[in-house]
Amino acid sequence: MTQIKTQYNRRSFIKVSAAAGGGMLIGFSWLNGCKPNTPEPEPGVAVPNEWFEINGYIKIGDTGKVTIYSPNPEIGQNVRTSMPMIVAEELDVPWENVIVEQAPLNTGWYQNQFAGGSLSIRLSWNALRMAGATGKRMLMEAAAKEWGLQVSDLAASEGIIKESNGERTISYGEIASKAVGLEVPEEVELKAVKDFKLIGTSQKNVDGKKIVTGEPLFGLDFHRESMQLAVIQHPPAFGMKVKDFNEDEIKGMPGVHDAFIVDTSFEDSDRFDEKGFLQLITIVGNSIWELLQAKKALKANYETVGELESSGMHSKRLEKALVSGEVQESRKDGNPDAAFKKAAKVIERTYTAPFIAHNTLEPMNFFANVTEDSAELIGPTQTPEALEGSVSKLLGLPLENVTVNMTRIGGGFGRRLYVHFGVEAAAISKKIGGPVKLMYTREDDMTQGTYRPTYRSVYKAGLDQNNNLIAFTVKGAGLPEGPVFPNRFPAGTVENYSAEKIKSETNVTTGAWRAPRSNFTAGAEQAFLDEVAEAAGKDPIDFRLELFDRAINDPVGEEHEYEAERYAGVLKLVKEKANWGKTEPGVHRGVAAYFCHSTYVAEVFDIVLENDNPVVQKVWCAVDCGIVVNKDAAKNMIEGGVIDGIGHSMYSQLTFENGAPEQMNFDSYQLIRHSQAPKEIEVFFVENEIDPTGLGEPGLPPAIGALANALYKAKGMGHYHQPFISEKQIVG
């Protein structure tokens, strides 16, 4: 197989080879190191012999079809549509000629092969554009050689190459195979943003038809002949481990092939590994119904190995941490203590949020087939490389002997960053000596951990006699990680400012939950700012814009994370679109704006009271996420974030008694219902030429603040403790 490779730096390269069945195959790195006009190339990287082993690639067939194998997990953020749109734009092919398929994990070729942090498009933008532009350039060079012309004599569009001063044309499919032997250009020209034809349009999900018609796509759909099924039971409380169970009785039940305790502990575990329940009771058989009946018959004995924490203990730990806890990160400008002593008005509020679960629609599941010298894993994971590494450690296998293939994921929200369910499947497969699919129940998932941490923050502000903000402080503690971002807004806007992020210990396992830390801090901060604005006698938006003016014209301190102009820009846009300042009688309005994942979002909520219960009538959202690749998908992500933010801040919480979660399913843990979702959501995107930033998470955090502020206007009382429905003033 003839192959040509070009390396632009250590983390970006392009490879070209003949594709199976004719045509041209372009492989490229899916890395944030790819940049246009990168400097001195370094020695090339060895290329796999087979095309399917190439790290992230485009395949151009002799029919003119283009296939993009996407390395990134698809968790509903629509990257399997948006990523190929970027390539197709630069390649200049009709969108209907593009198909996309999921690539397996390949740690030898990929980096950033994960779904998290709203990073998929952001880290892949330049690599995808480079791959498409390189393919187009090489096809044009092949055509120029065929016709005895210069590339400058040709033009390409919609998959067709044309002679500029003649009538000859040739399709990409017809010329693709002849491009294989050409030298890859050291640099390629990317389109100007103004020339985009596909990027910025709305395209439907490429898997949409398969999803609605029930084609197998998800981990729960996966089936292999001869595989067995498995269910697990972990201890009922954090701080406990399995001692023994009625093994013989369970093994004798109908449909049960085996039952045993499996141990998933290993050395050198990392942040994506399970820390709470490492010994599990496992039941294996062929029928999930029979396995669940056997699980109901379990009589297990557990032993206490740690403290059995209750919710009251969690609250006390957070209170204590705010006084004497370990400060993880902090910032101080000026002298806040002195400023407070001089202040004419001082406002101080405390905000809290409980542990909450992820509750993905698709419960945890994974397939594993472990042999003496290899392990194959297939299922829904946001971090396939972390899973590969953990299974390698657990089984003592070389990394190259572990393979991970990704299915489409029925919801992640950070839950599937953690790999224990794949590791458990591998351990079970090794024990039984054959292929197995592990399946969790909802109760297994909700009581296992990796929850959103519980938080407590205290905000304090001082106003002078002219109602100017002269001091602002925040101290936030979490179990275990504090929620405060010291260098975010309002850092840089207040002369006397301090922020402290404080940690405290717990044996309840926690993890990333959609927009980590921001999902609490945005609501608390933005609700507090509205009360400060009220104390100052100022409009909430005008008050915020005054602060941004300070950050733009005369910033305080050495640095802050955000761009004040863009932050103020979304506030101004949502103010205009919502016709701020003009509402109908009985409509109560709240606003919030927040920056996270490099994106700026401002939201206005209108609520009405029906039988003294709040109903979200309409939401306006203004978003600055740089270039929008797929408007349809982008709008969906913002809408979903708004609904998610409302639901969890209004209704959801996990409480504990003697280390055991008290909510185990949706009969006691409330999620938002269809009737409680906003009646209407409008989304507006700021148009600019900035490279795309995060979008899967930034829509959620400001929704909590805007909701709290609208509720404050409706009820005349602040909302400081989530879930808001639990506060007496909301019950009605």
Image (cartoon, helix red, strand yellow):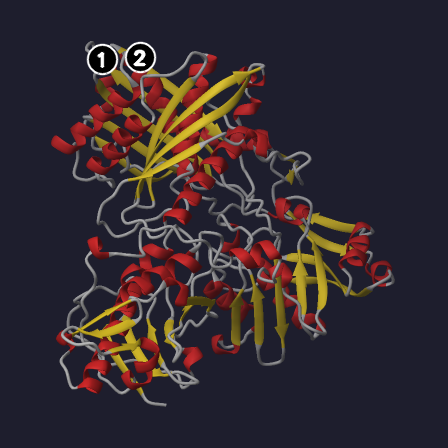
Does 679 appear above or below 128?
Answer: above
Look at 44% across and 60% down and name the residue there: 80
Q: Earlier in the sequence, mark 2 or mark 1?
A: 1
Q: Can residue 707 be seen here?
A: yes
Label for residue 467?
1
The answer to the question of whether label 2 and label 1 lie on touching residues, with beta carbons closer than 8 A, is: yes
Look at 58% across and 44% down and name the residue there: 359
Q: Of the residues shown, which amino acid type is indicated by label 2?
A: Ala
Q: Which residue is under mark 2?
A: 535
Q: Quadrant of residue 556?
A: top left
Left or right of residue 583: residue 313: right
Q: Of the residues shown, which amino acid type is indicated by label 1?
A: Asn
- Residue neighbourhood size for the residue with mark 2, other residues' Cα within 10 Å, grouped as few (<14), some (14–19), many (≥20): some
Label for residue 158?
none
What secondary structure is marked by label 2? helix
Left or right of residue 335: residue 97: right
Does 653 appear above or below 143?
Answer: above
Look at 30% across and 62% down and name the residue there: 89
Front position in the image: 402 or 304:
402
